Image (cartoon, grey):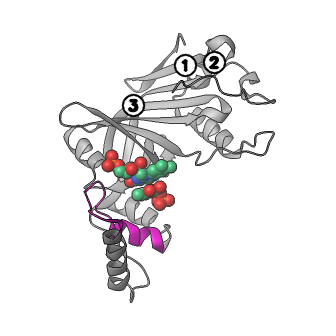
Amino acid sequence: MRVGYGKKPVPPRPSEHPHLDESWLADGWFSLFLNWLRDATEYVAPGGGRIAEPNAMVLGTVDDRGLPATRTVLCKGADDRGLVFYTNYESDKAHHLDMHPYASVTFPWVLIERQAHFRGQVEKVSEEETAEYWHTRPRGSQLGAWASHQSRRISARGDLEAALEAVTRQFCDLDYVPVPPFWGGYRLKPSVAEFWQGRENRLHNRIRCEKNGSGWEVFRLQP
Ligand SMILES: Cc1cc2nc3c(=O)[nH]c(=O)nc-3n(C[C@H](O)[C@H](O)[C@H](O)COP(=O)(O)O)c2cc1C
Ligand code: PXP
């Protein structure tokens, strides 16, 4: 199958916004990231379309053979320390991070012709931070996390549903489902951040910043 040129978005084109400039990253990645995440969250296309899951980011890790793996996770926390996501600490990605605690994440905001990309060291968040987030999750998602041994094989869908029924019974007398010991957050602490903005003729804007001691080195890359 040939993957060709899609339909162009109708006006107003986000690519008519001012050129991405090095000065926007003078203080590091965080404030521009927040602005772009907000733009992605609030954007409504002329036909009414929105960006589904604007906080979705593609997480890249490497396995013990050095083979890369990517999958989507939701960014559930962001501050100048880094970007937080939650997952199963016994999943494939967690095993990758145990062996090699570095990762990349990419936010592909295609509808607004922007992309933000980060690379850096990853560490687990504190149990308190995990618990605080866990208790905001719907009970169904909490039970689902208990029921799923993420990334392990299962022979039939029915086994998964039976596991959900079992944990539903197990916790039916509790007002609050406890945090599973095998579940929690990770924080990716960017040492490299790159912002991409689509432009005519594929002459896109790319500005990268790299941690340099306590500051950031900022530079433009060819598209
Ligand atoms: C939009 C979207 C959001 C997702 N968010 C998460 C998430 O926040 N945490 C998570 O563990 N899995 C999430 N998943 C599922 C992962 O992509 C992945 O299938 C799962 O974490 C297992 O990955 P692993 O086997 O590489 O560890 C999401 C999937 C999609 C499509
Ligand atoms: C397995 C899994 N864990 C965690 C999440 C994070 O989102 P939430 O905490 O809102 O369920 C997702 C989102 O799709 C998910 O699929």
- The mark that comes first in sequence, 2 or 3, is 2
Q: Which residues are magenta?
A: 139-157
Q: Position of residue 41 (x, y in %)?
A: 66, 46
- The mark that comes first in sequence, 2 or 1, is 2
How many labels, in total? Answer: 3
Judged from this view, the residue extending furthest toward the bottom is 173
> Which residue type does callout 3 highlight?
Arg
Q: Position of residue 112 (x, y in %)?
A: 67, 33
Answer whether labels 2 and 1 touch (C-beta < 8 Å): yes
> Which residue type does callout 2 highlight?
Asp
Residue drawn at point x = 65 percent, y = 40 percent: 40
Q: Which quadrant holds the C terminus?
A: top right
Q: Position of residue 51 (x, y in %)?
A: 65, 44
Which quadrant of the structure image shows residue 169?
Answer: bottom left
Residue drawn at point x = 36 percent, y = 33 percent: 120
Is residue 187 on the magenta stretch? no
Q: Position of residue 171 (x, y in %)?
A: 36, 83
Residue tagged 2: 21
Q: Are there few (<14), some (14-19), or many (20+) residues within 10 Å of tag 3? A: many
Residue tagged 3: 119
177 up-or-down from 133: above or below:
below
| Nearest to the observer: residue 160 or residue 11 | 160
